[in-house]
Image (cartoon, rainbow, N blue to C red):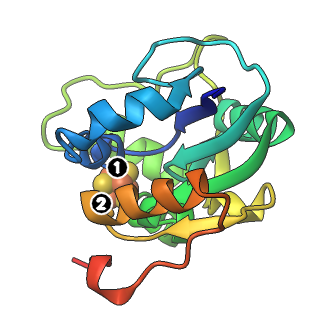
Amino acid sequence: MAKTKVATVWLDACAGCHMSFLDIDEAIIELAGLVEFTRSPITDIKDFTPVDVGIVEGAVGNEDEEEVVKKLRENCKILMAWGDCACFGGVVSMRNLFEKEEVLRRCYVESESTGKGKIPSSKDIPPLLDKVKRVDEVVKVDCYVPGCPPSAKAIKYALEELLAGRIPILPSEVMRFD
Ligand code: SF4
């Protein structure tokens, strides 16, 4: 039987959602028999190829992340948002309370640990968007796995439902809101 192809991306995020996925422990061995990971921080493959499921950790905070999530959407049949940052903006959207320039100045110039700081500028650094966006403000999302991070149980349940051909509706006992 052909394996289900899955790509995952990590945008404006802390990696906690991917770490929570790895917490499914030995179930990952069974999953490895059913799923082929293509582009993902897990495989370190950078190119997009068509997949069955695309998974997004993190919100959209800069122009590069906006491009990445659009490319993933173009290349997947089902797009799943993992974690509060992807689903709702989460902690990374706290910067939306301020102007982008204020955030950069506070971070790189005014912070107590900064000496003669300056705001970094290079063509290799993707420009920040004015405001952090939820993933579904940029592309269509088919299913959501909230939590910060989502529990390993929730991630496992969602993947199993997708592998069974169903869009997951998470039962409350696997949800985590802390
Ligand atoms: Fe990290 Fe929580 Fe955001 Fe996941 S939802 S990337 S764990 S801050």
Q: Residue at x 60, y 28 (%)?
A: 3
User: How far across and down, in percent of the image, does residue 55 sit?
Assistant: 57, 45
Q: Does residue 136 appear left or right of residue 156 in this picture? A: right
Kindly identify which residue carries mark 2.
Answer: 149
Q: Quadrant of the C terminus?
A: bottom left
The crowding category of the residue bearing disc 2, from other C-alpha atoms within 10 Å (few below 14, some 14 to 19, many at least 20), is: many
Looking at the rendered structure, the kind of residue marked 2 is: Pro
Give the structural element (helix, strand or loop) at label 1.
helix
Answer with left or right where residue 85 lies relative to residue 99. left
Q: Quadrant of the N terminus?
A: top right
Dot 2 beta carbon under 8 Å from ligand 1: yes
Mark 1 sits near ligand 1, with its Cβ under 8 Å away: yes
Is label 2 in a helix, a strand or a loop?
A: loop
Outermost residue, front direction? 1
| Front residue of this view, candidates 53 and 72 | 53
Residue 72 is situated, as x and y percent measured from the top left of the image, at 74, 36
Contact flag, marks 1 and 2 (Cβ < 8 Å): yes
Which residue position holds label 1?
Answer: 17
Q: Position of residue 132 (x, y in %)?
A: 59, 57
- Decide: few, some or many residues near mark 1? Use Cα within 10 Å; few <14, some 14-19, many ≥20: many
Residue appearing at x 13%, y 35% in the figure:
113
